[in-house]
Amino acid sequence: MPNKRLQYIDCLRGAAMLMVVYSHVLSFMMGRLQPSPLGLYMRDIMLPLFFFISGFCAYKSNREWSLRSFGQQVWGKTRAILIPTIIMFLLMMLYSGQNVMDAIFRYDKSGYWFAWVLFQILIVYTVFDVVSRSFSNRWCRLAVTFLPLVLFAVIFHFVGYGSRAAYLFEWVKVVGFYYFFLAGVLVRWYQPQVQKVLANRYFSSGLFITALVVYNQFGGGKTMLLNVLLIYFVFQSVEPWFSKQGNRLTYVLSTIGRHTLEIYFIHFFLLFTIPVVPEWLNSLSSDACFGNRGCNSLPEFVIVGAISVLLCYVCLAIKKVVGLFPLVYELCFGPQKK
């Protein structure tokens, strides 16, 4: 199956990026705000969804492997993710006046943990993908692809998660999010079969109802993969609508989706406290519109959603200005996309 850029995946990635910015607006710009159920759901789903998409995009069916191509892959990921993460992290330390060593050994890394964890997951996946391609049998390849999960379980059982090395390398997050990354790989690997299954209206309806019921009963932790798959299916099923000429929503989501790392790196510098609005939204959360549900989901979505889109476009404008200086751009955001 030839690999090509998929419009609905760009839109899905854009939606995930908006959820990330949305969550950070709630956390940093409206710190006193009690998030609505919608805001809490976005906070639960955004990162598993992002790692799922990363796995989906990482799988290449037509990739030819050699030692040279492997080195090129690792160097490409280093240029695109690792070096910009280090540079932007150091700039944030300078901007915020934080101690670099303290921040390095915190699990949040001042927000830049995501790119650091993604880089490690991509390297681990690349190594085992190279090994798996030495087997012609699909089941052997599949077993090798799953091998990192076994190794993670064994190694971290003995090493533990409380050491300074564990904090430095974010082992908890590497292990936790590798499942979602691998799920994305498998969906792309078996995409023709997945599309046939999802095309069944009874299955798709059952998946939707099951995801809602189970999430409502058990929360996001135990059912997050089901919800991620549901969101992927929704975007995949409306692909013809996303591909319509002049679709404004497609333009916005795909524009953001094609520049997620740049937006991710920049938006932390733009988060400032907003007055009044959090108190007003909090007052709505105590009103009961639907049974014991508050009335703050829609106003929060409109206000925080608008701010999130605006922040993304400000980030894109800054990216464009930095693009006038190619060396600076590559250090901060990786090689410029053509």
Image: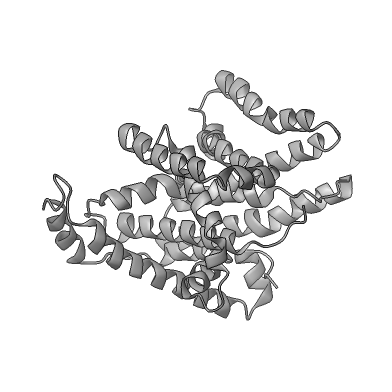
Residue 106 seen in the figure: no
Number of marks present in the image shown: 0
Coordinates of residue 104 in the picture (x, y in percent): 51, 45
Query: Is 266 placed above or below 227 here?
Result: below
Q: Name the residue nearer the viewer: 120 or 106.
A: 120
Coordinates of residue 181 in the picture (x, y in percent): 59, 42
Coordinates of residue 158 in the picture (x, y in percent): 58, 18
Q: Name the residue nearer the viewer: 193 or 92.
A: 193
Q: Is 47 positioned to the left or the right of 75 in the image?
A: left
Kindly identify the residue that appears in the image at 25 percent across and 52 percent down.
36
Query: Is 329 placed above or below 87 here?
Result: below
Q: Which quadrant of the rendered structure holds the C terminus?
A: bottom right
Kindly identify the residue that appears in the image at 49 percent across and 53 percent down.
234
Residue 27 seen in the figure: yes
Q: How is the image coloured?
A: one colour
Q: Quadrant of residue 319?
A: bottom right
Kindly identify the residue that appears in the image at 64 percent across and 78 percent down.
325
Coordinates of residue 76 in the picture (x, y in percent): 74, 56
Kindly identify the residue that appears in the image at 63 percent across and 49 percent down.
56
